[in-house]
Amino acid sequence: MEFRYNRVIHSITQISPFEVVCDFNPLTLLDLFPLLNNDSMTNRSCLVKATFFRNLYKDVKAQIEKQMEKLDSNANSERNKILFQHGD
């Protein structure tokens, strides 16, 4: 169950939790059938990989902040601002 949960694309970040941490989703048996020859994950230098993760985390953080602003505005839309005077 944990493996399945970590592969599901999250509605806020638009990527899976596993992808946030590792930059790719782990392969399942269904993924192994086509066996496309993709070297993009194995030939990256450390600097390129680190830069990619830095940008990925920045994007994920921006998505989360955007969703939090939406939730904030929805939660606060029906609240009335009350001003108290000295002595109230």
Image (cartoon, rainbow, N blue to C red):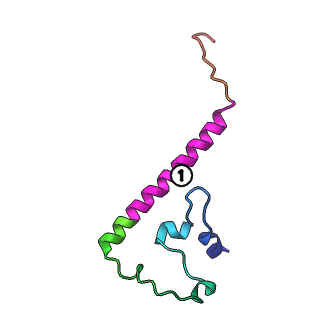
Name which quarter of the figure residue 52 lies in: bottom left
Residue 43: x, y in percent? 35, 81
- Residue shown at 55% from the left, 58% from the top: 13
Name the image quarter holding the C terminus: top right
Residue type at mark 1: give it.
Ile
Q: Which residue is mark 1?
A: 64
Of helix, strand and loop, which one carries label 1?
helix
Choose top left, top right, bottom left or bottom right for residue 57.
bottom left
Relative to 58, does residue 32 appear above or below in the rendering?
A: below
Depicted 13 relative to depicted 50: above or below:
above
Main secondary structure found in the magenta portion: helix
Quadrant of the snapshot with the N terminus: bottom right
Q: Residue at x 35, y 68 (%)?
A: 50
* Magenta part of the chain: 53-78
Task: Give neighbour class at mark 1: few <14, some 14-19, many 20+ (Cα, 10 Å).
Answer: some
Rendered position, 81 above or below 58: above
Give x and y (percent) for residue 46.
32, 74
Name above or below for residue 16 compared with residue 84. Answer: below
**In the rendering, at what x and y percent does residue 19 appear?**
51, 69
* Residue in front for this viewpoint, 5 or 33: 33
Name the image quarter holding residue 2: bottom right
- Please name the residue shown 46% across and 71% down the image: 23
